[in-house]
Amino acid sequence: MDWTDKMITTVLLIAAIGGCATPHKGPEAEPAPFHPAWWCRGANQQTFLGALLRPVPPLQLQRKRWETPDGDFVDVDLLPGASGTPILIVLHGLEGSSRSRYVLSLLAAAEREGWRGIGVNFRSCSGEPNRLLRSYHGGETSDLTWIVQKVIAENPGSPIFLAGASLGANVVLKYLGEQGEGLPSSVRAAVAISTPFDLALSAHTLEQGFSRIYMRGLVRGLKAKAKTKLLLFPGFVDERKLNAVKTLTQFDDLVTAPVHGFKDADDYWSHSSSIRFLSGIRRPALLISSKDDPFFPGKSLPVAEVAANPFLTAEFTARGGHVGFLTGSWPGRVRSWTEERTIQFLKKHV
């Protein structure tokens, strides 16, 4: 996720009360099971510091604007490379972007393997409002379908991998399940990190306890974009009601659902949650989630669904927070376990 200055201040307070444990040892050829850094063991420490400290080496990315068939556009950041090499397509989370640290870190991991990469911005997330009233949401897979087809047409024969974090992970898994046996053969495997498998449950979780801090930042960003759209599409939403929105449930009821053709938030969540599509996945997919994720309750992770589908592999760790999974001996020597584990898994399917 992307955080405000107030959240950064909170990070420093949380980091100061971290527990102590045996320091993690140096890098290994194969990523070991995840163990949080001794200085960053809590769920909120992992979540906040993962957004701030995840290492991102310099990348030579090329920003491109792809015109969509419906008259809108999608902005992408391209990581160039040799023709014929694998291509990793990465999707960000709610109110993130292709410049979120976890996206850049995954692209950097791809570059180290000699792969190419594409950091996708959902509509309205590249720093410029999209042209249409519609934007993006947790179940919007038509853009990903079009992007994959475009990449295949321009790179015939190249293996394609998908990776998503948070909301982007939900989109990736829903897309795979929808496509099922019809998924293009070029798409070899996927990784989903910190997936909100049940969007209703995730929204309600974010409205409780400390998790409300994350929700407030997300809602603030969503409302700001909705107000920008009001300038382009006057009257599409009651501005007084929009100003009164405090929770994700209220925003999805008022804006997300009606704009994208759903009756209400419950209807949107029901049709868009990836847990309904896991049984249809027919490509190897690695599901990385933490049981202490403040965005999704560990007791509700899809253990039974994973066991029933041989194409799914689960790494449901005890700790890691939300898109955190930081390890390393000291804060100045941070390592991101998810990127290591992602590449290890995908390399098996080149």
Image: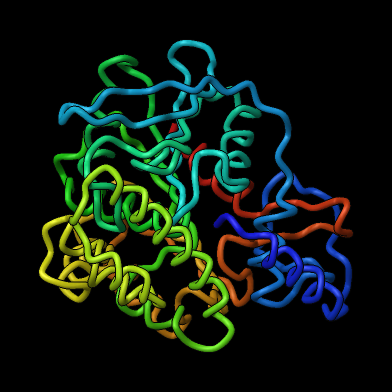
Where is residue 189? Give x, y as percent.
38, 42
Residue drawn at x 38%, y 23% is 65
Check the image and tell me how it is coloured: rainbow
Instruction: Point out the image quarter for the N terminus.
Output: bottom right
Where is residue 349? Give x, y as percent.
43, 37
- Residue at the far top: name it: 83
Q: Can residue 238 be seen in this view?
A: yes
Is 63 above or below relative to 229? above
Is 168 above or below relative to 322? above
Residue drawn at x 44%, y 85% is 299
Is 199 above or below relative to 73? below
Does residue 18 appear left or right of residue 213 in this picture?
right
Is 49 above or below relative to 250? above
Residue drawn at x 73%, y 68% is 36
- Looking at the rendering, which quadrant does residue 110 occupy? top right
Where is residue 332? Give x, y as percent.
88, 52
Nearer to the camera, 52 or 338: 52
Where is residue 158? Give x, y as percent.
37, 20
Residue drawn at x 24%, y 31% is 72
Instruction: Point out the image quarter for the C terminus.
Output: top left
Does residue 99 appear left or right of residue 32 in this picture?
left
Does residue 135 appear left or right of residue 1 in this picture?
left
Nearer to the camera, 137 or 133: 133
- Looking at the rendering, which quadrant does residue 170 occupy? bottom left
Nearer to the camera, 314 or 163: 163
The number of discs equals 0
Q: Is residue 302 visible?
A: no
